[in-house]
Image (spheres, rainbow, N blue to C red):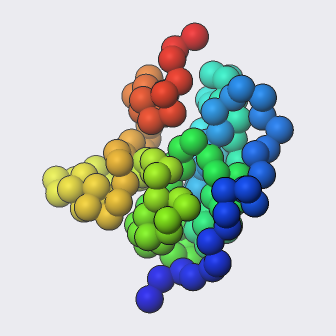
Amino acid sequence: MGYQQPAATVEERPRTMRGNKKLVLIVEDNELNMKLFHDLLDAHGFATIQTRNGFDAISLAREHHPDLILMDIQLPEVSGLEVTKWLKEDDELRSIPVVAVTAFAMKGDEERIRSGGCEAYVSKPISVVMFLETVRRFTGEQRA
């Protein structure tokens, strides 16, 4: 039994005032990581919305329909993999790519994360170059 909320229609999903910028939803409970991810993305021409709460990620994704979701796997209330599962079960949200950002970097973790619905993962501490390349790959954004 997953997270249930009525699906919004395409017309009900407002686009934020972001101009031509790609929008990235950051789901991260660590304040320093949140600031780092936001600052990096902002400096490279992306718009961001952020939440520290996995449950809020679902409603924010419905409201803003981001181009990419960066998902911390170790959230306090609910696993980021559980939130990803809910996103991928939702007809309106399943096409949004989810990239896990995690301290899990042991053998077998990548398979577990990918089988959980994430398209890719970036390990913490992040490599700035790899982080930005991954974001660009999943948003279709070309390097400036």
Q: Residue furthest right?
A: 17
Whether residue 67 is situated above or below residue 72 in the rendered picture: above
Assign the N terminus to one quadrant of the image: bottom left
| Relative image position of residue 62 (x, y in whole percent) | 66, 61
| Relative image position of residue 81 (x, y in whole percent) | 41, 66
Residue 37 shows up from this direction: yes
Q: Nearer the viewer, residue 1 or 48?
A: 1
Residue at 51 percent across and 33 percent down: it is 139
Whether residue 114 is situated above or below residue 35 in the rendered picture: below
Tally of numbered discs: 0
Whether residue 20 is situated above or below residue 29 in the rendered picture: above
Residue at 35 percent across and 48 percent down: it is 119
Whether residue 98 is situated above or below residue 6 in the rendered picture: above
Residue at 70 percent across and 52 percent down: it is 64
Is 78 positioned to the left or the right of 5 in the image?
A: left
Residue at 45 percent across and 48 percent down: it is 97
Is 85 positioned to the left or the right of 36 in the image?
A: left
Residue 53 shows up from this direction: no
Assign the C terminus to one quadrant of the image: top right
| Relative image position of residue 138 (x, y in whole percent) | 45, 35
